[in-house]
Amino acid sequence: MAYKQVIIVRQDLKLPKGKLAVQAAHASVRAVLKSDKRKVNKWDSEGAKKIVLKVKDLHGLKRYLNKAKTAKLKTAVITDAGLTVIAPGTTTCIAVGPDKEEKIDKITGRLPLM
């Protein structure tokens, strides 16, 4: 059974590539730290697959966060400290998983790649 993690980023913030990469990394790490160690080990043994997807805005991000929580998937929400390019307290992205690929795809499968 394949495992993966999805990071969902807000498109409306128009983050510079470096900032986007850092926010996605924060989300991935935070979600892994919150996750069941057996799932993390299985995911890691398969190559730690990560997919970065996009939503239009904060409303879309919250919608997918709620769907993931309803499906009992581990999530992490990243809120920026505001030290560089965006205002303090801005929610930039979320991570979902790692978990079974089909469980995550039921929630995020229609979102476009970043």
Image (spheres, rainbow, N blue to C red):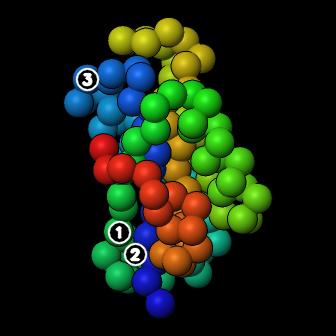
Please say if 74 is above or below 36: above
Q: Upstream in the sequence, badge 3 or badge 1?
A: 3
Location of mark 1 (residue): 49
* Rendered image: mark on residue 44: 2
Q: Nearer the viewer, mark 1 or mark 2?
A: 1
Disc 2, SS: helix
Q: Nearer the viewer, residue 2 or 56?
A: 56
Q: CA distance from mark 2 to mark 3?
A: 28 Å
> Which of the 4 image quadrants contains residue 45?
bottom left
The reply to whether residue 50 is in sight is yes
Location of mark 3 (residue): 16
Q: Nearer the viewer, mark 2 or mark 3?
A: 3
Disc 3 and disc 1 in contact, CB within 8 angstroms: no
Report the residue at 50% width, 9% height from top.
87
Q: From the viewer's perspective, is 100 left or right of 70?
A: left
* x and y percentages locating residue 27 in the rendered image: 49, 45
Q: CA distance from mark 1 to mark 2?
A: 8 Å
Please say if 44 is above or below 35: below
Please say if 1 is above or below 50: below
Number of residues whose C-alpha sits closer than 10 Å to that of mark 2, classed few (under 14), some (14–19) or many (20 or more): some
Report the residue at 52% width, 50% height from top.
95
Q: Callout 1, which amino acid?
A: Lys
> Which of the 4 image quadrants contains residue 79?
top right
Q: Residue furthest front?
A: 110
Report the residue at 46% width, 32% height from top.
56
Disc 1, SS: loop
